[in-house]
Structure formats: structure tokens, C-alpha cells
Amino acid sequence: MNVKFKGNPVKIVGDEIKIGEFAPSVKLKGNDLGYVIVGGKKDKIQVLNVVPSLDTPVCAIQTKTFNQKAASLPNVEVFVISMDLPFAQGRFCSVEGIANLKALSDYRNKEFGKKYGVLIDDSPLSGLLTRAVFIIDTEGKIIYKEVCEEITKEPDYEAALNAIK
């Protein structure tokens, strides 16, 4: 997987998962400091919207876009996952009026980053998650995956949403 940050190659570590494979279950911290499990088999389709930090313009746009689109999708649960602390995620969601998705943090042990193969290992963003979107069907299989080639660019929203239909 070739990922770049401002045109410079970035090393991504973890287990690369592919479309058709089962999505690993991972426990992440929510804004209330409780745990939320993503991945695996669930009653709803899961959209895992992965960003380096909500405190950047592109990540904020990506999160707001998925928040807007989430309101009209039946049987879909949308998450934004970053390394931001739950307090910062809660503040961001409150200030930006984010109500249609759940913000989750992988700051504790970087388990999500490792299991989904999106943990940045070098560059100025080392230790954060690279920009990606995973969609998991109700059986727990990955039906869509996009790891953005350039971290500073938004994902293909329409392709992601079309994978749900």
C-alpha cells in the first residue's frame, strides 16, 4: 500500500485486510469513556470513517460529510475513528453539531490501527491513523475499503456510499 503525506512516502504498519475478509472486532474508547466495539458481525452495516485527527480541516470535512450522509441511511451505523482523546472528540462533535455518528478513539493501545493496517509508523504523523474508509456488512465482512493514497486528500464519498446500497 502506497500512502503519502504531502507527496512524501509514509510507512503504514499493521495487518492489511482485504475486501471479502472478516473485519476484526476492536474495542475503542467513546466520548463517555466507555468502550464501543467495531468490526465483526452486527445487526447494522458499519461505516468506519478513519482520520488522523479531527483537529485538521480535511478530517473535519470528512467527518461532517459522513455525518450528513448518515442521517439518510437506514440500518447503518457510522463511526469516526482517530487517535484524538475522547474529550477532544466530544468537544469537536458538540461544536460542529455532529449527531449522526459516533466518535471513537484508538489512543490507548493502537489496536484498531494495527488490526486494520492503518497505523502510521513514520513521518510527522507517526503514531496516528492514516485516512481510510471501511464498510462492513451485517455478516462482518469488509465490502468496501479505501486507504487514501494522499493523507491530505478526502476519500471518495460516493463510492463508499454506493457500496452500502
Image (cartoon, grey):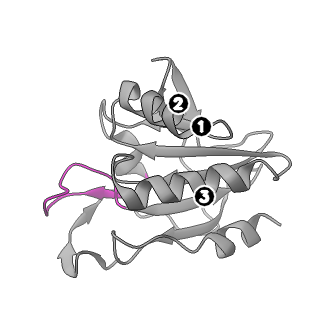
Circle 2 sits in a helix, a strand or a loop, which is it?
Answer: helix
- Residue closest to the eye, 133 or 26: 133
**Residue name at image x 51 percent, y 71 percent:** 155
Three-letter code for the amino acid on which mark 3 is drawn: Thr
* Residue displayed at 62% across by 55% down: 66
Q: Nearer the viewer, residue 17 or 51?
A: 51
Query: Amino acid under label 1?
Result: Gly
- The secondary element bearing badge 3 is classed as helix
**Element carrying mark 1:** loop
Report the magenta stretch's main SS.
Answer: loop
Q: Callout 3 environment at 10 Å: few (<14), some (14 to 19), or many (20+)?
A: few
Q: Is there CB contact under 8 Å for labels 3 and 2?
A: no
The span picked out in magenta is 116-130
Q: CA distance from mark 3 to mark 2?
A: 16 Å
Tell me the residue that label 2 is attached to.
94
Residue 117 visible in the displayed image: no
| Residue 84 colored in magenta in the image | no
Q: In the displayed structure, would residue 57 be above or below residue 38?
A: below
Q: Nearer the viewer, residue 97 or 122?
A: 97
The amino acid at mark 2 is Ser
Residue located beneath label 3 in the image: 65
Q: Which circle's residue, 1 or 3, is located before the other in the chain?
A: 3
